[in-house]
Image (cartoon, grey):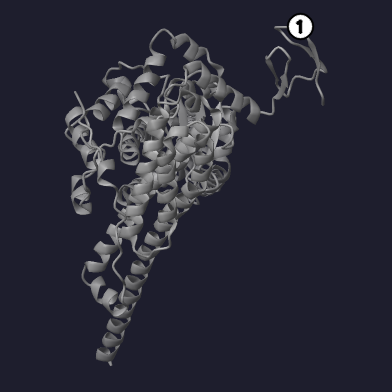
Amino acid sequence: MWFIIEQNKRKTAIFLVILTLFFLFFGTALGFSFSSDLYDRTYYGSFMGFLISLICFIGIIIYTKFNASKFFLNQVGAAPIKKEDLPILYNVVEEMSISASLGFIPKIYIINSEIPNAFSIGINEKNAAVAVTVGLLSILNRDELQGVIAHEIAHIKNLDSLYLMYAGVIFGVVVCVSDAILRGFARSRNRKGGGAALLIALILALISPILVKLLYLTISRKREYLADACACGYTRYPTGLASALNKISNFSYSGNKNTVIKDEKMNSGKIVSCLYIHNFLQKEKSNFFEELFSTHPSTSKRIQILKQMGASDIGEYNKVYRAVVSDKALINDKNLIKMNIQSIPIIKPLIEQTTDAKDSRINRQRKAKDSFKKAMNYKVIHCDCDAKLKIPPELQISEITCPSCNKVHKILA
Amino acid sequence: MTVSIILILLGLLILIGFISTYNGLISCKNNVKNAWAQIDTQLKRRYDLIPNLIECAKGYMEYEKNTLLNIVNARSLAMKQTDNIKEKAEAENQLTSTIKSLFALSENYPELKASENFLQLQEELTSTENKISYARIAYNDAVMFYQNKKEQFPTNIIATIFNFKDMEFFEANENEKEVVKVKF
């Protein structure tokens, strides 16, 4: 699949160059509009604007490179887990890393939210991480979890979060700068003249954030499809991912919508909603215009493609994609032919591969929650009546009464 | 003068092409090696897990001594040092199927199925099996890429000069490749 990564890198590079040019142009235009005399031949203001925006740009790139993963993970309150906490999750991530020949195993995090969702971030051994919610772990079986994790690993392998991180941050800056230009324009209205240059700057300031956003979202949606396609190649079992997506999207649209919106984790997740496997803030049945402005393709279309696949390679995904979504291919056919990709048959997991097949939803949920609490340094007290008392680290008390047998326990510091 | 400069430039160009082709071949070969190392790690992991599995199952499966013995034999056969990848693959496939038969038999022993230790071992072994099969795919891809590169012109000239050897595929057990027809 190396050529997809190459293609991705190229597209990312082009997109980032366009964004950077936009960015520097805005800086210059801003400096221009702020300079006291518009007929100042030294263009001192423009130059300063250019310089300042260049410095800001470099600063942002350095910041995202070193801190973005941590920033996003902190945003959603994710806790890192170890292998002994949740062996199945850890094994699945390891399996998919091997299948994708990633060369390393991403760090694994748990988010304490009932909403089933997952996201991945980072591109290399240092910053790559996969985060899943307690809700996801409690509703999916092993095969479905494998599909979801494969999708997330594909995002890491395809360097998607690099694109999302940089593009997202730069997009935010473009919006700010264009806003500043409009303000600058309003301020300079009283002056005489201004001419065509200012008018062009104004028009660009108005439309470019929208254009950048549309471009960004189009590529973002394509990448979701591409991650699905790669995930099938990794697991060799498209039905697993299809059934996982089905369970996830059904959760959001069966009367639980209010919970989704009220959930505090999800609100802070607005920033990272584009990174999740399923965007709960997005309507399932949307019109053309709404679809144009969404980060994810419609989940029902994704499921439809996955269900119609007769093999599990990218070529097959491409074929079904053309039939279901549009005539335009997801991946350039010429590339596929050049690589002479062989058809990979679907391999149905054997019964023993779903080692938790008989595990109940409540049991899985308990396991996931326990490992989250362990990762967050909760104190556990075993009461004589078989109850387990879990005390959050921020609760500073010296005694606690067991709710079922009223025995008083002392908490050791 | 000009002719000699052109000749020198041409010579340099050929040298650069030569070096980069050679390096390309070496990196492909290293890819294959790395992929093999991944398979090897997982195979070793499986060898380490099997004694624990036998120990755990022994108490419950009194009447299945043959199955357990088969696993032990298959394991020692697979652990034999051999450079022939085909033989190795065969021995490993044999081991895989004996382990699978043990798991299938375990369905008849509810006490064994309920044991937390057994469940954990089952998860570990299943995951290791998965990892082996995924690592095998990665290895075979690397081998295919290497072989393709080695046979193409002009790389094949350099491959012949420096005696780059053919690599063997690590074949899966044909029974394993169960193709499923999807219903619409």
**Residue A201 shown left or right of residue B18 in the figure:** right
Q: Quadrant location of residue A208?
A: top left
Residue B134 appears in the picture as rendered: no
Task: Tell which of B27 and A369 is nearer to you.
Answer: A369
Q: Which residue is mark 1?
A: A406
The residue depicted at 37 percent of the width and 65 percent of the height is B83
The residue depicted at 50 percent of the width and 40 percent of the height is B54
The residue depicted at 21 percent of the width and 28 percent of the height is B182
Q: Quick one: SS at disc 1? A: loop
Say above or below: A207 vs B159: above
The residue depicted at 36 percent of the width and 24 percent of the height is A245
**Residue A325 shown left or right of residue A394 in the figure:** left
Task: Tell which of A119 and A148 is nearer to you.
Answer: A148
Callout count: 1
Say above or below: B81 vs A175: below
Chain ID at mark 1: A
- Quadrant placement of the C terminus of chain A: top right
Task: Tell which of A395 and A363 is nearer to you.
Answer: A363
Q: Residue A175: where, in percent of width, then height?
A: 46, 32
**Residue A381 shown left or right of residue A311 in the figure:** right
Q: Residue B62: where, in percent of width, then height?
A: 47, 33
Residue B29 appears in the picture as rendered: yes
Say above or below: B134 vs A240: below
Query: Which residue is farthest front?
Result: B63
Q: Residue A238: where, in percent of width, then height?
A: 30, 32
Residue type at the position of mark 1: Asn
Q: Residue B77: where, in percent of width, then height?
A: 40, 55
Say above or below: B140 vs B24: above
Q: Residues within 10 Å of mark 1 (few under 14, many from 20)?
A: few
